[in-house]
Amino acid sequence: MRLREYIKRLEEAGELQRITARVDTHLEMAEITDRVSKSEGGGKALLFENNGTDYPVLMNMMGSDRRIAMALGVESLDEIAERINRLIKSVTAPKSGVMDKLRMLPLLSDVAKWFPRKISGRGECQECVYMGEEVDLHKLPILRSWPHDGGEFITLPMVCTVDPETGIPNMGMYRMQIFDRRTTGMHWHRHKTGARHYEAYKRLGKRMSLSVALGGDPAYTYAATAPMPDNMDEMLLAGMLRQKPVKMVKCLTNDIWVPADCDIILEGYVDTTEELAIEGPFGDHTGFYSLSDLYPRFHIEAITTRRDAIYPATIVGVPPMEDAYIAKATERIFLAPIRLAIQPEVRDLYMPMEGTAHNLAIVSIAKRYLGQPQKVAQGLWGAGQMMFNKYLIITSEECNIRSRDELFALLRHFDPERCMIHSEGVLDVLDHTSPTTGYGAKLAIDLTDIDPTTPPRQLKIPKTATPTEGVELFDTSLFDELGLLILYAEREWRERIDVAKYLDDNGIEARFVALFDRGAAGWLQHSDLLWLAAANVDPQRDITLHNGAVILDARSKRPGYGTNPKRFPNAVTSSTDTIHLVDERWEEYGLGEMIESPSRRYRKLWLSESAEWR
């Protein structure tokens, strides 16, 4: 399915809004998309047809339950999950006789059809060719999303590399900051396959050829984000999702193979002997700015395109956004492989969008023996991209882990002395709470033995509270449901607050106490507070126990204070000028009733007017 065909399907389904008014790729386009993507159900896909370049921009194309299913060619993601379940059961079921083995042949034949196929000649992605001085990234509608971003970024690149030792290809998604008309950064984290290939080329003293694909079948874009096992071709997954093989064509200036029907291809190389370049900051999917760091330079030798190419882009920031729906697809698609290869007792996996994929996950398991939740936690923390997980909640298989009421019923009986499983390990390098980049504390909560029908421990809280130095407000809106007391620090208060003394002075008996910055009071919903707590709380430094209560310090931390990180970033928001511009032009966009800017409330969280602490 070509990208234009997908756009046609979206429009026929009422899932696309064309914007014909001229929209600037510098901040304005991102602010519009942020408003739409955070509206009910993810809003609509947006096609910006007038942006000052020859290429329309498609945004939010997979940013709803319906659109992510459409992108993968199904009515519901459950169809894909069921397909994979059948495949795995067929492959792993014992074969007792000749007839059982013969029944496998049609299945194996179907699997063989999914492998990518190399074709000769040029592909549709090579209808227009620009080389030498014709190469100019500024002719593409590359976005600058947020005011403190380091520059313009390509945000949906499918980066195609090859292992120099095995010849096995890989397609990953690593953001690319534009340095000049022919050079970008290549932001692959140290744990990613692209970085491993780079290190292999560096050991061999070779220049690393690579190409970047944009557009084409949305299944390609999803596959590039998927947590595929190392040394397994992502285009095999794309073929399985499409139920037909991906046709691959050889690039014109290197030996990299790319999907033939993509919209835009960037061909080039990374010089492994070259000094790394400063890349970032960038308003990231965590909802905060990821800080500047050193990454390789990608030198572009050729740009090839379709004649009718469309430029796909996304923005990331405070959830919910498009990436949350992509993560939903990953939950459903990879649950069966997790059971097969890692944890057979896992029954369901849920990554709430407030956890931005890595910060929070919930699993239900079929528990049979003592210590099994510990085994599951350690197993998942050692598996693929689950190794980045910071907080993990484990329930029995009877619990519907997507039900707020059922989870709250278990958490009302939470015993911190018995239910908390502490560990350390790999974290996402974007995690800003740990004092060591890419490594830190983890916490699992074992709820498997809790009987929600038994009476919970009695809690109490007074109608008024005696002030404690540093505490300005308190919120009891979740006290009856969850036993959670929310406290807000005094404005600009950065020192330690004695929450235990506050509880004792007021005779408060709570199950959970969360301390937030004053800027979060009255502006953020409960889901926002969950996002903020999952992002800002380090399991080792920021969680303490007092008289059966779990106290979480979810404030932004002063850099360098105690075990705090050296720098603590700001939440990602649009600038005041951009918000006002979009407000004034809203009728021109043809998007109906005004949608308020989410940035108005998230700016209340800012530590300072800089993008990060200096």
Image (cartoon, rainbow, N blue to C red):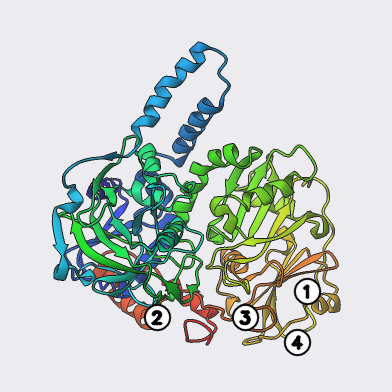
Q: Is residue 284 left or right of residue 428?
A: left
Q: Which residue is mark 2?
A: 575
Q: Nearer the viewer, mark 1 or mark 3?
A: 3
Q: Nearer the viewer, mark 2 or mark 3?
A: 2
Q: Earlier in the sequence, mark 4 or mark 3?
A: 4
x and y, in percent, of residue 514 in the image: 70, 70
Residue at 49% x, 17% y: name it. Answer: 101
Q: Which residue is mark 3?
A: 518
Q: Earlier in the sequence, mark 1 or mark 3?
A: 1
| Helix, strand or loop status at disc 2 | loop
Disc 1 to disc 4, how far (Cα)?
19 Å
Q: Quadrant of residue 113?
A: top left
Type of amino acid under label 4 = Glu
In the foreground, 381 or 529 = 381
Q: Are marks 1 and 2 in contact (CB under 8 Å)?
A: no
Type of amino acid under label 1 = Lys
x and y, in percent, of residue 57 in the image: 26, 62
Q: Which residue is mark 1?
A: 463
Q: Nearer the viewer, mark 1 or mark 4?
A: 4
As drawn, 198 above or below 91? below
Disc 1 to disc 3, how far (Cα)?
20 Å
Type of amino acid under label 2 = Ser
Q: Earlier in the sequence, mark 1 or mark 4?
A: 1
Q: Which residue is mark 4?
A: 469
Q: Is residue 332 left or right of residue 33?
A: right
Disc 4 to disc 3, how far (Cα)?
14 Å
Q: Residues within 10 Å of mark 2 (few under 14, many from 20)?
A: some
Q: Are marks 1 and 4 in contact (CB under 8 Å)?
A: no
| Helix, strand or loop status at disc 1 | loop
